[in-house]
Image (spheres, rainbow, N blue to C red):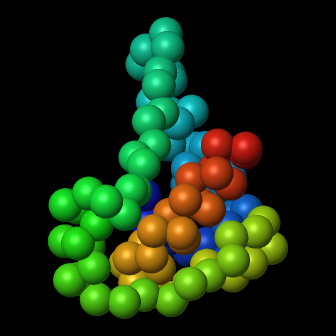
C-alpha cells in the first residue's frame, strides 16, 4: 500500500498518490491491472492479522481526514475494503 505522505484527505491520497502512481506505471507499459486482495474471515491470514493488534475503524470518504497512524488504519479489514472500493471508483 502506498503511504499517504503529506495528504490530508482520502481525496488528496487518491489524486496525489494512488492515481499518480498508476499514471506513472502506465507510461512504461501498454496495459496494467490493479488487483485487490479479498480478506476472508475463514482464512489463516485473518487469524495472523488479528494477532498484530487492533486498529481504529475509519469512514473512507473524499473529505475524510487521513488517519495519523496509517498502519493501524490498515489493520482493520473493513477499512481496507472501504479504501479499495473508494480508490477503484476514482
Residue drawn where x is 19% and y is 61% of the image: 44
Residue drawn where x is 62% and y is 81% of the image: 58
Residue sticking out furthest to the top: 30
Residue 75 locus on image (x, y percent): 38, 76
- The quarter of the image holding the C terminus is top right
Residue drawn where x is 43% and y is 14% of the image: 29
Q: Which quadrant of the structure image shows residue 9?
A: bottom right
Q: Is residue 16 left or right of residue 1?
A: right
Q: Which quadrant of the structure image shows residue 6?
A: bottom right
Q: Is 59 rendered above or below residue 45?
A: below
Residue 80 locus on image (x, y percent): 50, 63
Q: Would residue 46 be visible to someone looking at this image? A: yes
Q: Is 75 rendered above or below residue 81?
A: below
Mark count: 0
- The quarter of the image holding the N terminus is bottom left
Q: Which quadrant of the structure image shows residue 35?
A: top left
Residue drawn where x is 76% and y is 68% of the image: 61
Residue 4 locus on image (x, y percent): 51, 68
Q: Is residue 26 left or right of residue 58?
A: left
* Closest to the observer, 43 or 53: 43
Residue sticking out furthest to the right: 63
Residue 42 locus on image (x, y percent): 31, 60
Q: Is 29 rendered above or below residue 63?
A: above
Residue sticking out furthest to the front: 42
Q: Would residue 70 be visible to someone looking at this image? A: no
Amino acid at each position: 500500500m502506498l503511504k499517504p505522505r503529506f495528504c490530508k484527505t482520502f481525496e488528496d491520497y487518491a489524486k496525489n498518490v494512488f492515481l499518480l502512481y498508476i499514471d506513472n506505471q502506465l507510461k512504461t507499459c501498454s496495459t496494467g491491472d490493479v488487483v485487490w486482495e479479498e480478506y476472508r474471515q475463514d482464512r489463516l491470514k485473518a487469524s495472523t492479522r488479528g494477532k498484530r493488534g487492533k486498529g481504529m475503524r475509519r469512514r473512507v470518504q473524499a473529505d475524510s481526514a487521513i488517519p495519523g497512524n496509517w498502519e493501524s488504519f490498515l489493520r482493520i479489514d473493513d477499512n481496507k475494503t472501504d479504501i479499495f472500493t473508494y480508490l477503484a471508483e476514482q
